[in-house]
Image: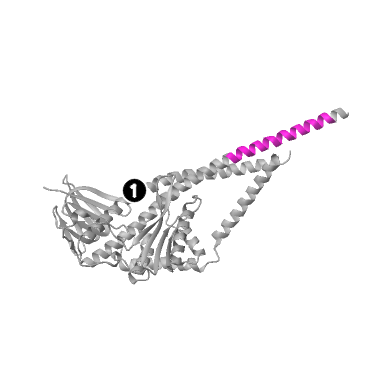
Amino acid sequence: MSGGKEIKGQISSIKNTQKITKAMEMVAASKMKKAQGRMSSARPYAEMIKNVVGHLASAHPEYKHPFLVKRDSVKRVGLIIISSDRGLCGGLNTNLFKQALKQINEWNKNSIEVDVCAIGSKAEKFFKRLNVNLVAQVSQLGDSPEINDVIGPIKIMLDNFIEGNIDELHLAENKFINTMSQEPGLNHLLPTVPNKEDDLSHHWDYIYEPDSKSVIDNLLIRYIESLVYQGIVENVACEMSARMVAMKSASDNASDLIDELQLVYNKARQASITQELSEIVAGAAAV
Amino acid sequence: MSIMHLDIVSAEEEIFSGNVKNIIAAAMMGEVGIYPKHTPMITPLKPGEVKIITEEDEEQLFFISGGVIEVQPDIVTVLADTAIRGQDLDEARAAEAKKRAEEALANKSDNIDAAKALAELAQAAAQLKMIETIRKKGK
């Protein structure tokens, strides 16, 4: 019975793998629900702050914040990349990196240098291998990221922008479309042009306490932070759904493989029985 | 008595949304009480309580660790921070993120994780090869 035992061993090892992938699929499915909930509960803040910044733009403060001013020449740009911490989630991170890399090459062609801020350990590992200037990094945010974790890295980028080290700030993130599909995208963060509202076009302004500069500074920093935070929360949802899909297809593949191997095993067993029988018959005939 | 719409949101969740008669919050320059039809105003909030009186004359208290309040005649928005903020604290967080980036760049000759992953990959490849040979033998 040639190879019968090896095939048996193979089958049981694939079965073990399948158990793992099935478990991961189910874990990802339940985490995905939570992550989607978190995503939708973070949305009101993002919308509110967007409204407020929009109001600010249509009001007429005497102070013009650097975040709102477009620069004439762009020599160096900042790029914030949001990735997951763990792998086994299909092409989620790879697709995002591919797109980011394409953009970075484009910038380099126009002799624009790039400063990268990596969020998530996958991005960190990826950009460490390339020769890019990694200026800030944060990882191990877990499944329920807190805004606390991203204040630091964003501050570095914003400070760089204010000091004039970088002239633009971009954000590379995965957009959650539905469970089956996530789309990598690049967003322009700074300088920002908040959408102005037409119905507030008459001249009016807020009362700023203590003064317009500190209020607007504060608010715009929070605005950028909330955009990045929203991206991170969305990325967790993307990660979980991508992992669920990847693990489902891995489990299906394992089932196919087991079926095939089972067939091979049965054939081998049958062959060895037939052989034994013919040997016995031949032996009996010889006697 | 007239009412106004109030939203209290933090980056991580929506805390309150509904109609209220009065809001008392600890603004940067001192406590403010806001009634409907207030002039547009925008000011940072200090960590502390936000007291509201709802449509049904119920009193509710929320604790926020700072934020911004935006007042429009009929709509008030409180953007609450969940993180405790401060110039020094933010600075420290930035320094930490930078340090991590430098550390990550410093140990370019990768760490245990990569070695482990490679070993696992080799194992998986060997397993696949074996499956292939067994399949060929069976046919």
Where residue A236 sits in the image (x, y, percent)? 42, 51
Q: Is A273 covered by the magenta stretch?
A: yes
Q: Which residue position holds label 1? A: A40
- Magenta part mainly helix, strand or loop? helix
Instruction: Give the extent of the magenta segment.
Output: A256-282
Task: Name the image quarter holding the N terminus of chain A.
Answer: top right
**Residue A244 at x, y = what percent?**
47, 45
Residue B132, relative to residue A262: is it above or below?
Answer: below
SS at badge 1? helix
* Residue A136, x across and y down, in percent: 42, 65
- Would residue A255 appear left or right of B23 to someone viewing this image? right
Name the residue type under label 1.
Ser
The C terminus of chain A, quarter of image: top right
Q: Quadrant of residue A71?
A: bottom left
Residue A58, image x and y in percent?
Answer: 21, 59
Q: Is residue A77 above or below residue A22?
A: below
Q: Which image quadrant for residue A254?
A: top right
Decide which of A251, A59 is in the foreground and name it: A59
Residue A172, visible in the rendered structure: yes
Q: Residues within 10 Å of mark 1 (few under 14, many from 20)?
A: some
